[in-house]
Image (cartoon, grey):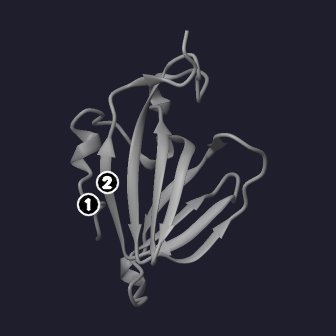
């Protein structure tokens, strides 16, 4: 079973974190097979309504290395909400250089495969809408 690299950068501060806590995509950068996505995260378990833009979020930058089969279907402008984001371990399927399947199963707006998932950085909590 493959693990997300540097996962402790998130779980040290947010032990109950899971990929479905990704609420919005802030930015994306594609460069020679590596996709970097910056997400705004908010823990679902602590919210009656999710995402709650009146509360804080934390920013997570993740590299998806050796990405293949990239599918994006975004509409509108501004932040893109992801409602059912998943990082699935598919390493036992025997596919060459594919260990993870990434998808937003609710909106079907993003989907791809990759060899590795690496947490680059995690920010302190911030408000998306200043008071």
Residue displayed at 45% across by 77% down? 33
83 relative to 12 in the view: left or right: right
Which residue bears the numbered disc 1?
5
Question: Element type at marker 1?
Answer: loop
Which circle marks residue 119 in the picture? 2
- Mark 1 neighbour class, 10 Å CA radius: few under 14, some 14 to 19, many 20 or more: some
Expressed as whole percent of the image width and height from the top left, the position of residue 78 reads: 68, 40
For the C terminus, the image quarter is top right
Residue displayed at 59% across by 22% down? 53
Which circle marks residue 87 in the picture? none
Q: Residue furthest right?
A: 76
Residue displayed at 69% across by 58% down? 109
Say if mark 2 contacts mark 1, CB within 8 Å: yes
74 relative to 37 in the view: left or right: right
122 relative to 46 in the view: left or right: left
Mark 2 → mark 1, Cα distance in angstroms: 6 Å
* Front one among 48 and 22: 22
Counting labels gives 2
The image quarter in which residue 66 lies: bottom left
Expressed as whole percent of the image width and height from the top left, the position of residue 105 reads: 63, 57
Expressed as whole percent of the image width and height from the top left, the position of residue 91 reads: 37, 78
Q: Is residue 113 above or below residue 55?
A: below
Residue displayed at 64% across by 40% down? 79
- Going from the N terminus, do you reach mark 2 or mark 1 first? 1
Question: Element type at marker 2?
Answer: strand
Q: Is residue 119 above or below residue 95?
A: above
Expressed as whole percent of the image width and height from the top left, the position of residue 85 reads: 55, 52
For the N terminus, the image quarter is bottom left
């Amino acid at each position: 079973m493959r693990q997300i690299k540097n996962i402790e950068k998130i779980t040290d501060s947010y032990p109950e974190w899971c990929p479905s806590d990704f609420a919005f995509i802030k930015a994306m950068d594609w460069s020679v097979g590596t996709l970097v996505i910056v997400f705004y995260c908010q823990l679902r378990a602590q919210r009656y309504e999710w995402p709650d833009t009146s509360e804080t979020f934390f920013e997570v930058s993740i590299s998806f290395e050796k990405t293949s089969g990239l599918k994006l279907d975004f509409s509108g402008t501004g932040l893109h909400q992801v409602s059912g984001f998943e990082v699935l371990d598919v390493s036992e399927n025997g596919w060459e250089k594919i260990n993870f399947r990434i998808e937003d199963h609710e909106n079907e707006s993003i989907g791809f495969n990759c060899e590795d998932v690496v947490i680059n950085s995690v920010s302190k909590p911030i408000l998306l809408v200043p008071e």
